[in-house]
Amino acid sequence: MILAWNISVFVLGLLIFGATLRLMMGPTAPDRVVALDAINTLVVAIMIVLGAVYKQTVFVDVAIVYALLSFVGTLFIARFLKRNYL
Amino acid sequence: MDILTLVVYILLGIGLFFNLVGIIGLLRFPDVYTRLHAETKTTTFGAIFISLSIVVHSLHQYFHANDASGLSLSIHVVLAILVLAFTNATGSHAIAQAAYNRGQKPVRAVVDKLAEVEFLEKEAEE
């Protein structure tokens, strides 16, 4: 079971690499925000899986706080995009 | 192989598959709306399924292996799933609205129904 979770953490890391490609390539600013949102969700998933691997609940707590903070960040970036600052 | 281990593996596989599909859609779709459509839903769905596999495993640990940390881990994971579901939906809506207000059009778009609706509403107010 531990091995399967480690492998899935590795695969999720590769997917973060793919989203980073879109973050760098993205032609417009909203594309980059979409890629950033994907990276945030994948990081939360990785933290949850690592919390199960190491049997530490602290990882999942950090994941909850990270999800809330990334939500606030996404909302603020969307607000700036709406006013055409970037 | 235990049936419960099989269930955990299947849930984990579904989650990884949907995350993979979401990232492929993010990389290959042509404009921001389709990328948002591909990425947000599938990534949230995949994260929910990966978390479900962990909930199943840790509840099994709690009830059958006398592991006291299993219950607290599963409760926290369920909380994280709830937070993730609500925030992802709201955030993607905000991104789409910002992209529309910036004036981005979908590729190969012919009509703009939302602009027509807003125009008609403005006329109805006057």
Image (cartoon, coloured by chain):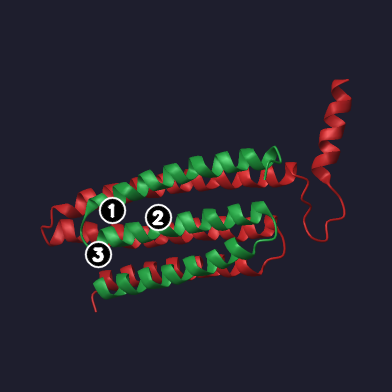
Chain colours: A green, B red
Q: In the rendered image, which quarter is residue B27 located in?
A: bottom right
Distance from disc 2 to disc 3, alpha carbons, whole Å, reads: 14 Å
Whether A72 is drawn above or below A10: the answer is above
The N terminus of chain A: image quadrant? bottom left
Residue at 57 percent of width and 67 percent of height: A21
Q: Which residue, given by chain and number where applicable, does mark 2 sit on?
A: A44
Q: Residues within 10 Å of mark 2 (few under 14, many from 20)?
A: many
Taking depth in this image into account, of B110 and A78 the one nearest to the observer is A78
Whether B126 is drawn above or below A48: the answer is above
Taking depth in this image into account, of A76 and B69 the one nearest to the observer is A76
Q: Residues within 10 Å of mark 3 (few under 14, many from 20)?
A: some
Residue at 31 percent of width and 71 percent of height: A6
Whether B126 is drawn above or below A4: the answer is above
Give the amino acid at mark 2. Answer: Val
Give the amino acid at mark 1. Answer: Phe
Distance from disc 3 to disc 1, alpha carbons, whole Å, reads: 10 Å
Whether A77 is drawn above or below A30: the answer is above
Instruction: Give the mark nearer the N terminus: 3 vs 1.
Output: 3
Distance from disc 2 to disc 1, alpha carbons, whole Å, reads: 9 Å
Q: Position of residue A3 (x, y in %)?
A: 27, 75
Q: Which residue, given by chain and number where applicable, does mark 1 sit on?
A: A59
